[in-house]
């Protein structure tokens, strides 16, 4: 929920702006791009967590087994993640070109540009910071947490780009001042959307308190509390 709405990658961190602005003219194309980005960020996060946990982080088990001593290869994070993202994008591009040719043509240059979509790299680096950048091993993210971030980040990107596409379709029928036509009105709408999504701040903490079970009070403590309350009630005047 946090990655999808509250800390939306596009409207909170302002990453992935290129496809967000370039492929948000029609709702159907925007939805397709959102699905493509969700798939790519999920595959890239799965592979990046695997590489980080087993090879790149300090004291990684596979690296220690091969080299014979603990090593820190986190300096290679950027290079490995870029190769992983590029490979995932190529797979998605071949799939869409074969099975959805009209959608492939509508994406144009923005489909291969997913490779340089900083939202995907940002997601991989955020996962890496919770795998190799933690001091307490108990705080290290497992694969489930990494995939939850990736999937909901992709869903959040899809929500943002589809809403933007719907607004831009309506703007085509509006009398927009000439000085704001094109990128100007689009950036203004994106800013207003970011302000609107700020209204969800704190919802995650509220839901966590609501869903978190209340702590169990020991029977002895509850009995003592009841006895104290009874004594206080007897000493009240009247």
Image (cartoon, helix red, strand yellow):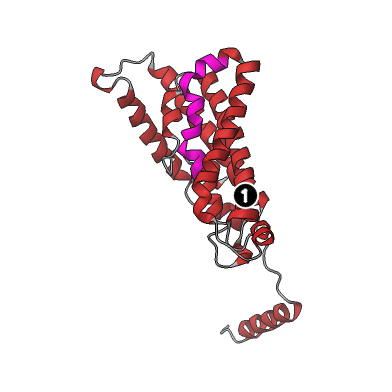
Residue 121 lies in the magenta-colored region:
yes
Instruction: Name the residue rendered at 39%, 40% in the picture.
Output: 195
Magenta run includes residue 3: no
Residue behind mark 1: 51
Q: Residue extending furthest right?
A: 219
Instruction: Indicate whether 211 appears above or below 179.
Output: below
Q: Could you tell me if residue 203 is visible in this image?
A: no
Magenta stretch: give its range: 103-122
Q: In the rendered view of the protein, which quadrant contains the N terminus?
A: top right
Q: Up-down: is 12 above or below 178? A: below
Residue 154 placed where, x, y %?
56, 37
Question: Camera-side residue: 196 or 90?
Answer: 90
Number of disc labels: 1
Task: Report the residue at 42% width, 30% height from top.
Answer: 18
- Quadrant assignment for the C terminus: bottom right
Residue located at (26% from left, 19% from top): 177
Q: Residue furthest left?
A: 179
Which secondary structure is most common in the magenta stretch? helix
Q: Quadrant of residue 136?
A: bottom right
């Amino acid at each position: 929920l946090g990655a999808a709405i509250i800390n939306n990658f596009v409207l909170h961190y302002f990453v992935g702006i290129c496809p967000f602005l370039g492929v948000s003219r029609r709702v159907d194309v925007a939805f397709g791009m959102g699905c493509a980005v969700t798939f790519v960020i999920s595959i890239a996060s799965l592979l990046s967590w695997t590489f980080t946990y087993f090879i790149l982080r300090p004291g990684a088990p596979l690296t220690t087994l091969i080299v014979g001593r603990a090593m820190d290869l986190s300096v290679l994070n950027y290079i490995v993640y870029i190769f992983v993202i590029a490979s995932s994008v190529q797979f998605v591009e071949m799939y869409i070109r074969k099975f959805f040719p009209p959608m492939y043509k509508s994406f144009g240059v923005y489909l291969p540009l997913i490779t340089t979509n900083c939202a995907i790299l940002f997601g991989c680096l955020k996962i890496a910071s919770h795998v190799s950048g933690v001091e307490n091993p108990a705080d290290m993210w497992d694969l489930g947490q990494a995939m939850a971030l990736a999937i909901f980040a992709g869903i959040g990107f899809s929500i943002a780009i589809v809403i933007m596409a719907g607004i831009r379709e309506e703007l085509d029928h509006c009398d927009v001042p000439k000085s704001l036509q094109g990128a100007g009105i689009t950036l203004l709408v994106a800013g207003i959307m970011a302000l609107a999504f700020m209204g969800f701040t704190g919802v995650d903490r509220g839901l966590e308190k609501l869903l978190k079970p209340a702590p169990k009070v020991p029977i002895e403590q509850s009995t003592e509390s009841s006895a104290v309350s009874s004594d206080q009630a007897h000493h009240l005047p009247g």
